[in-house]
Image (cartoon, rainbow, N blue to C red):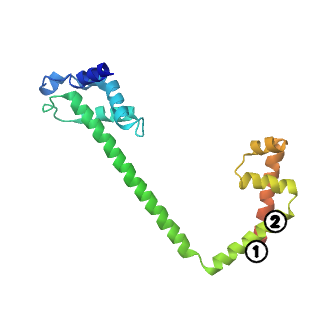
Amino acid sequence: MHKRVRKQHEEDTSETKPLSGADAMGSVKDLYQTYFRDLCLHVQASFGSGPPDPEDVAQDTFSKFAELQNTDHIQYPRAFLWRMANNIVISWKRREKSHLNHVTEEKHTHIENIVDVLTAERVLLGKEALSMVRTSLKKMPKFRRRVLLLNRLHNLSAAEISRRMNVPVTTVKTNIYRAMEDLEADLDQLDQQ
């Protein structure tokens, strides 16, 4: 175990000589070929396998590095790339957290708006529609009602219902379709009243 730690430390400190200028560092292509895989492993070890994906972070790192106007001040390119990658991941995580907070806030606002719109009339119409659905379900043949409830209430697919009830899938699909037609027709009657 100590040998592995020592080897990793030697790799981490392999840039002991300062380099000067972009010529001494070599091209971005050379840096990419030398450090890409190690940078991916560093990101994965530091932040996990994603998101963001370690390879995407490494790619972004080299892309941003290539955009730099002046690299003369960079003495340790490996350390510079590692720091850039860390910053990219941290920025990404901050954006995600901010986005999540915004989405959560939007949902709360939307729910508050829905609650504000609930009037006595809307509640009464909802109760009438629910009553009509109950009546429509009671009028349906028992098999059709059961298939519809398994599909819509228990989220079972037609194939799952078919296996469970030992009937062809087409029979299940036909009964779901007809049940929905029955419900729609009954609800249309309610709308016309």
Task: From the viewer's perspective, tell me whether residue 40 is left or right of residue 171.
Answer: left
Which quadrant holds the N terminus?
top left
Between residue 132 and residue 90, name the one nearer to us: 90
Image location (x, y in percent) of residue 114: 55, 70
Label placed on residue 192: 1
> Residue at the spot x=76%, y=55% of the render?
149
> Residue at the spot x=79%, y=47% of the render?
173
Mark 1 or mark 2: which comes first in sequence?
2
> Tag 1: Cα neighbours inside 10 Å, few (<14), some, or many (≥20)?
few
Image location (x, y in percent) of residue 157: 72, 46
Task: Kindly state the secondary structure of the residue where label 2 is placed.
Answer: helix
Cα distance in 3D space between marks 1 and 2: 16 Å
Between residue 104 and residue 177, name the one nearer to us: 104
> Residue at the spot x=79%, y=71% of the render?
189
Task: From the viewer's perspective, tell me whether residue 5 is left or right of residue 161.
Answer: left
89 over 133 or under it: above or below: above
Task: From the viewer's perspective, tell me whether residue 80 is left or right of residue 19.
Answer: right
4 over 50 or under it: above or below: above
Image location (x, y in percent) of residue 57: 35, 35
Work out which residue is located at the far front of the displayed protein and give it. Answer: 2
> Tag 2: Cα neighbours inside 10 Å, few (<14), some, or many (≥20)?
some
Quadrant of the rendered structure where residue 62 is?
Answer: top left
Between residue 43 and residue 131, name the one nearer to us: 43
Query: In this figure, which residue is indicated by the disc labeled 2?
Result: 136
> Residue at the spot x=39%, y=49% of the render?
96
Label placed on residue 48: none
Task: From the viewer's perspective, tell me whether residue 131 is left or right of residue 122.
Answer: right
Amino acid marked by disc 1: Gln
Amino acid marked by disc 2: Ser
Q: Is residue 183 visible?
A: yes
